[in-house]
Image (tube, rainbow, N blue to C red):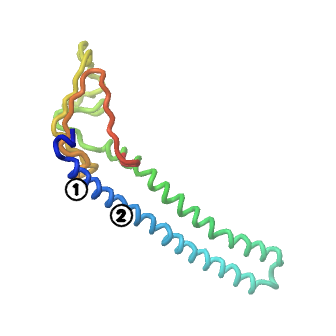
Amino acid sequence: PLRAAGLGAELRQHFARLLDESGRHAFHLGMLAPWMILRMNAVAAVFIAAISSSAVLLRGALPGAALGLGVAYSLNIMGKLQTLTRFSVELEQLLTSAERLDALLDAPLAPGTSAAGRETEGGDSAASAEPPKDWLQAGRLDVQGLCVRYRPGLPLVLQDVSFSLEAGQKMGVVGRSGCG
């Protein structure tokens, strides 16, 4: 259908632009990791230097075994800081989806709709309203010109989408990993 409409080349160019944009962000994320590791190594080196200097200054006041143990443990801190940094970045990335779900809970409802359990304008709970007996015996979903963005001010992620689903049909929306 796309080739028949003559959209193949245009869509390939659009895909290449989007792929370049995604690759640019992945490149910056990849460059951020070594930068952060270098900073964590600098912090660890200062800590190791402080512990080693303390061991030299306190060599007569503390037993040699305690000083050696302090220096040995200080050497392990470099790996621990790198692991902690990596886990904190991964945790932040994983919690992005939870943040999006939380934002959806606070999203304003479309005019003329109500959500189950939320108060309606008349003070009645929407959850207490019973649907008609013939409700959803058979259905059809028609969507025309749907436009969606993650939050106000961001670009549209779905733009002018239209489709129809008959009763019993299923539909999936596929996107890149982590897109919500």
Can you identify the residue that label 2 sits on?
A: 24
x and y, in percent, of residue 109 in the image: 23, 39
Seen at 30% across and 21% down, the residue is 168
x and y, in percent, of residue 89 in the image: 48, 59
Residue 141, placed above or below residue 55: above
Residue 40, placed above or below residue 133: below
Left or right: where 14 falls relative to 81 = left
Can you identify the residue that label 1 sits on?
A: 153
x and y, in percent, of residue 170 in the image: 32, 28
Q: Tag 1: Cα neighbours inside 10 Å, few (<14), some, or many (≥20)?
A: few
Nearer to me, 78 or 104: 78
Q: In terms of secondary structure, where does tag 1 sit?
A: loop
Q: Quadrant of residue 123?
A: top left
Nearer to me, 73 or 128: 73
Left or right: where 98 falls relative to 138 = right
Q: Amino acid at mark 2?
A: Arg
x and y, in percent, of residue 63 in the image: 83, 78
Q: Tag 2: Cα neighbours inside 10 Å, few (<14), some, or many (≥20)?
A: few
In space, the residues marked 1 and 2 are separated at their CA atoms by: 22 Å
Residue occupying the far top of the picture? 133
Residue 62, placed above or below residue 123: below
The mark nearer the N terminus, 1 or 2, is 2
